[in-house]
Image (spheres, helix red, strand yellow):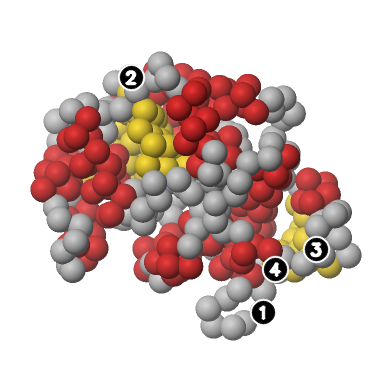
Amino acid sequence: MKEQGIQELIQISHYAAADIAYIQGGGGNTSVKLDEHRMAVKASGCKLSDMGETEGYVVVDYKLIKDYFNDANPDNAQFEIESAQVLKDAIVTIEGLKELRPSVEAGFHSVLKKYVIHTHSVYANILCCSAEGKGIAKKLFVDTSYLWLSYVNPGAVLTSVIAKEIQKLGKVPDVIFMENHGVIVTAQTSPVAIELHEMVNNKIKEYLNITEPFPEVSLEVINEQQVVSHSSYISDYFVGHAQSLEFIREKVLYPDQLVYLNNSVYKKDGSASNIIFKNNKVAYITSLKQARVNEETLIAYLYVLNLIEEKQLTLVSMTHEQQAFILGWESEAYRKSMLK
Ligand SMILES: [Zn+2]
């Protein structure tokens, strides 16, 4: 599609995807409302870096989605199934566009402003995964219209909570922090959306005194099925910590860690781990594409853990119940399988 909104969608998507500190693997999503009905939103299983004129997004009738969530009752036993059907029915078929599924987070995009950028920014997640985060946000963002959300299951429940909070507020906030998840910014123009996202991250970096650039991914392909990490950031972590990946099961920061990390190490079918730690190095028994997703997720995860520890904050892990919801989530499995 040639229209301007799509060009802007590509622009905000590539902006977010350019920094691994903001987007790791297939995480995060963006959207642009093209008119009173149509919204172009990232497709499930696609990467923001791959967003193009004819790929990476789906067009949906966001009015249908918004109306549904504004009245929906999340306590209804059929809520998850019913809302998934609403998302599916809202897809607008566009000639020349692949038939993809909208991101499971398309729901909350529908109830926000014209431009939406949602990232799993490590800086935002230092606050969102620590007990002190809410208080720090209160200090840093007194002049910003923002919402702080306690953890709720991502997808339909999250959308419904955001829709209800907006009804209560009587306006759409510019920034939404989601505990154990990430951050959303929304604006009426794309430059303002990018500016907001930069402002939020820069304020947190400044407050925490973070001046070092985010560590780089460093991978070497050994063969088609084996990739070795040369990231010193990863190997350094194990100096002074246990020489095992066991800790990832105890410290669960957010859903993408489960989907892109824990799921590769502790497999449902009991088969061997795809991520091995040996002689101070991490190796990925998978394709380069999947190894990159694993490594980006691992670096971001260790980064948030390290910073929480260094800044003497208190880590808040996801509960077992919250984890089970993610691991049993059919849409997430689909998203992951698309990246293979
Ligand atoms: Zn997310």
Q: Where in the figure is residue 106, as x and y percent of width and height?
A: 30, 46
Q: Tag 4: residue type?
A: Glu
Of callouts 3 and 1, the N-terminal one: 3
Could you tell whether 340 is left or right of 79 in the image?
right
Q: Is residue 266 visible?
A: yes
Q: Tag 1: residue type?
A: Ala
Of callouts 4 and 2, the N-terminal one: 2
Q: Tag 2: residue type?
A: Thr
Image marks 1 and 2: residues in contact by CB distance under 8 Å: no
Which picture quadrant has residue 147? top left
The residue pinned by badge 2 equals: 189
**4 or 2: mark nearer the eye:** 4
Q: How far is the residue under mark 4 from the one under mark 3?
A: 8 Å
The residue pinned by badge 4 equals: 246
Helix, strand or loop at mark 3:
loop
Q: How far is the residue under mark 2 from the one under mark 3?
A: 47 Å
Q: Where in the figure is residue 71, as x and y percent of width and height?
A: 11, 48
Residue at the image point whose x is 20% and y is 57% from the top: 74
Q: Front-most of 136 and 237?
A: 136
Q: Tag 3: residue type?
A: Ala
Q: Is residue 15 visible?
A: no
Image quadrant holding the N terminus, namely: top left
Q: Front-most of 249 and 68?
A: 249
The residue pinned by badge 1 equals: 272
The residue pinned by badge 3 equals: 242
